[in-house]
Image (cartoon, rainbow, N blue to C red):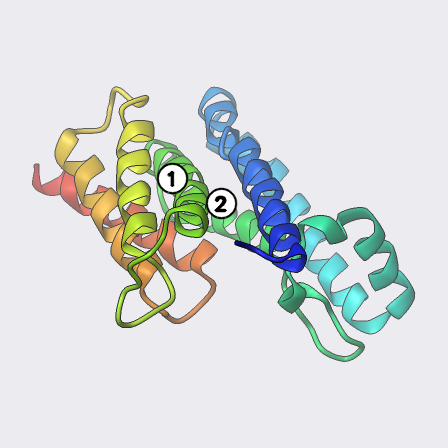
Amino acid sequence: MLNQEDQLVASNEVLRKGLHLVVAALPLMMLEIGRLLSLAILVPVTLLAVTADIIRSRSSRFESLIQKVFGMMMRRDEQAGEGHLIVNGATWVLLSLTLLTVVFDLETAGPSFMMFMVADAAAAIAGRTLGKHQWPWSRRTLEGSLAFVVSALGIGLLFAGISGWSMLAASLVGMIAESLPGPLNDNIRVPFLMALAMYIASMIV
C-alpha cells in the first residue's frame, strides 16, 4: 500500500506521462508540414526551453514561478538551485525531437520518437503499478520493459511505411536502452538508438 507521499508522486508521474502522450502526436503534424518547417518551429522552441532552464538556474524568482506553473509535473531532481543548471524533462524531449529531425529523415525520426514517447509512458505506468521483477542492472522492471516493447510495436503499426523487422529492431533496442543506466538522458539516448536501429534495419531489409 502506497503512503500519501508515494501516491502523490505516482499521480504526478501519470500526469507527466499523459503530457508525453500529447507530445507524442507531434510527429504526425510534422509529417504533414515537412522537415524544413518542422525545424523552423522546433529549433526556436527548443532554444527557448533551454534558455528558460538557464534562467531558472540563476534566478530563484523565476524558478519559483516555474514551480508554481509546472511544479506538479516536475520531479524533485528537476528543481534548479541558483548556479546549478538542471535540464528538465520537457526540455530533454524537445532536444530529442529536434536532434532526431536534424539527423534522420522524418519517416525515421517521426515514428521512432512517437514509439518511444508512448512506450516510455506505458513502461513507467506498468512499472509503477505492476512491476515486481527488477533488472539486475537498474531499477527498471521486466513488466515495464514488456509494456515498452508491446506499446512501441503497437504504435509502429500506425505507420504503413515501416517494415515489421524495422519496428521490431527499434522496439527491442529501445527496451534494452531504456532498461540500462546509460550516458545522457534517456529522452535523448533511447529514441536516438531506436531511430538508428530502425534506419539500419530498413537498409538491411
Relative to residue 45, is residue 80 depicted above or below?
below
Relative to residue 58, is residue 191 depicted above or below?
above
Element at badge 2?
helix
Residue 78, picture quadrant = bottom right
Location of residue 18 in the rendering, given as x and y in whole percent from the top left corner? 57, 36
How far apart are labels 2 and 1 at the CA level? 8 Å
Residue on which disc 2 sits: 97
Indicate the amino acid at tag 2.
Answer: Leu
Element at badge 1?
helix
Asked if the residue at tag 1 contacts the one at tag 2, i.e. Cβ–Cβ closer than 8 Å, the answer is: yes
Crowd around label 1: few <14 · some 14–19 · many ≥20 (10 Å): many
Q: Is residue 110 left or right of residue 61?
A: left
Location of residue 102 in the rendering, given as x and y in whole percent from the top left corner? 44, 47
Indicate the amino acid at tag 1.
Answer: Ala
Residue 109 numbered mark, or none = 1
Residue 159 numbered mark, or none = none
Choose between 49 and 71: the one closer to the eye: 71
Residue at image coords 38%, 47%: 130
Residue at image coords 18%, 39%: 168
Residue at image coords 30%, 49%: 143
Relative to residue 64, is residue 200 depicted above or below?
above
Location of residue 13 in the rendering, given as x and y in whole percent from the top left corner? 58, 49
Crowd around label 2: few <14 · some 14–19 · many ≥20 (10 Å): many
Q: Is residue 12 left or right of residue 64?
A: left
Location of residue 29 in the rendering, given as x and y in whole percent from the top left corner? 52, 24
